Image: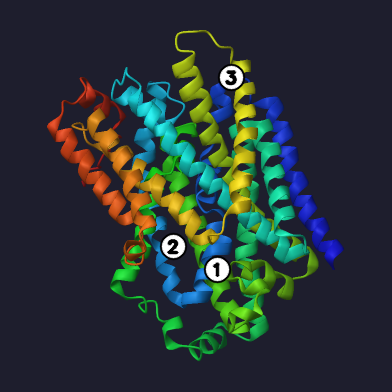
Amino acid sequence: MEALAASAFVFYLLLIVVIGVVSAKLCTRSLSEFFLGGRRMKEWVVALSAVVSGRSAWLVLGMSGMAYTIGLSAVWAVVGYIVVELFMFMFVGKRLRRFTEASESITLPDFFEARFKDSAHILRIVSVVIIVIFMVAYVSAQFNAGGKAISASFGLSTTQGLWLTAMIVLAYTMLGGFVAVSLTDVVQAAFMILGLVILPVVAVLNFGALAQVLEAVRLQGAHLVNPWAIGLGGAIGFLGIGLGSPGNPHILVRYMSVDSAQGLRKAALIGTVWNVVMAWGAVLVGLVGRAYFPLKSQLPAGDTERLFPYMASQHLHPILFGFAVAAVFAAIMSTADSQLLVAASGITRDIYQKLFRRGEAVSEKRMVFLSRLIIIILVFVAMGLGAAAKDLVFWLVLFAWGGLGASFGPAIILSLFWKRTTKWGILAGLISGTLVTIVWKSMPFLKQRMYELIPAFLISAMLVIVVSLLTRAPEGAEKELAEITPKYKFRRRP
């Protein structure tokens, strides 16, 4: 059994590495190709890459574990981001794609500097610092999750699993850049759907029927099958998770890479369907798991975040089990690779090229080489943090997600939709979003009452608006926003 499962898993890993090798030969000639795929990505690739890179181990391991713990109320944690990301595809993505192409921006710090004529590079520096801090924390959580998945599935130690996860991600990300990351995301989206559909369906059928599963869960506590059991405040708090989507750079760069802004409408449909199916699959895994294993002590190491691979080992054919473990890795790697690229672009493009070597001619070949070197360094830093991390994957990811969302979310939205936004307003929003997230998270009496992203996002948005009204807007902002605003045509009825 273990040999078949391992063979299926190894097949998946080899497929990912092959894509990285092929991409390295085709699409890493320039910095734009390495970090944005030359803005030639098709809408279906962008759709799948955007949704799977945003989900991470948080969905497959963390979300299924949360549904096991609190029951059907966990659904509120997925509703928020599904709705927000639909809005992002339809409206924010189009404007961001048009502006970044017109200004030749490759990174978000590029965008802020071009939008606000920031010749002092203040926004660029602050943005990079925030991105690197939260992205490294985010990647370390993914590596930690990989260690857990390997340990629960194949009996290796968590440390060995962490090393394996990190080395595979390093190999194809360093070789193929954005194209490799996006194409592997498509493959990984297929594995995630496979795992999050087949496992809960098979487990439910083995139990009897969905009604029997829900009844078994209800007997453990009526609150477990009541989506309102966490109360209105709890539901709003979980919905607030969606506020992170507009500010996470590894999602935003997907919109910048599409070959046409118009293609994002089709991408919205594809991405939303994928989001809904994956989300409900993760919630159902948690509920079915609760029916099979009423006591947490029945799970490996009593860890709810090992529920998915443990259930897969109990209910699936060895080959399908290998693919289910691949689904966990798909969730982990599709996020970690994207975050490594964004963090590397911040250091290579925004710090080295735009600040230290400003005005000097640096070859594209050298820039790509330096980008690969930075990715190697970031991987080992993230591995160190992942090995030392004691937090649960669910909450560690939410912290990084919240920090990025609160810092960049209001800044991105207001930059694209409000002509009065100023450089100083954006700076206030970036700093306040970061500080409020960290302070709120570090104070138990605050974090127990509300997820830190919500107050941090609101305070950041408020300060962007207030400070912008008190300072002078950049010249030409109204014209620039008019040029990137989609023109909608309405047909008159005859």
Q: Position of residue 47 (x, y in %)?
A: 50, 45
Quarter the N terminus occupies = bottom right
Q: Single out the mark in the foreground, 2 or 1.
A: 1
Residue 110 higher or lower than 282, as above or below: above
Of marks 3 and 2, which one's residue comes earlier in the chain?
Answer: 2
Task: Using residue 128 as the reference point, say whether residue 61 is left or right of it.
Answer: right
Labelled disc at residue 64: 1
Of marks 1 and 3, which one's residue comes earlier in the chain?
Answer: 1
Labelled disc at residue 155: none
Q: Position of residue 452 (x, y in %)?
A: 35, 56
Q: Position of residue 107 (x, y in %)?
A: 45, 29
Tell me the distance, in whole angstroms, between the alpha carbons under discs 1 and 3. Answer: 41 Å
Residue 423 higher or lower than 392, as above or below: above
Q: Nearer the viewer, residue 408 or 15?
A: 408
* Marks 1,3: beta carbons within 8 A: no
Of marks 2 and 1, which one's residue comes earlier in the chain?
Answer: 1
Residue 443 makes an appearance in the image: yes
Q: Position of residue 330 (x, y in %)?
A: 64, 52
* Marks 2,1: beta carbons within 8 A: no
> Would you name the residue on which mark 2 appears?
78
Residue 39 higher or lower than 336, as above or below: above
Amino acid at circle 3? Met
Amino acid at circle 1? Ser
Secondary structure under the numbered disc 1 in the rendered image:
helix
Amino acid at circle 2? Val
Please tell me how crowded label 1 is: few (under 14), some (14-19), or many (20+) other residues with Cα within 10 Å.
many
Please tell me how crowded label 3 is: few (under 14), some (14-19), or many (20+) other residues with Cα within 10 Å.
many
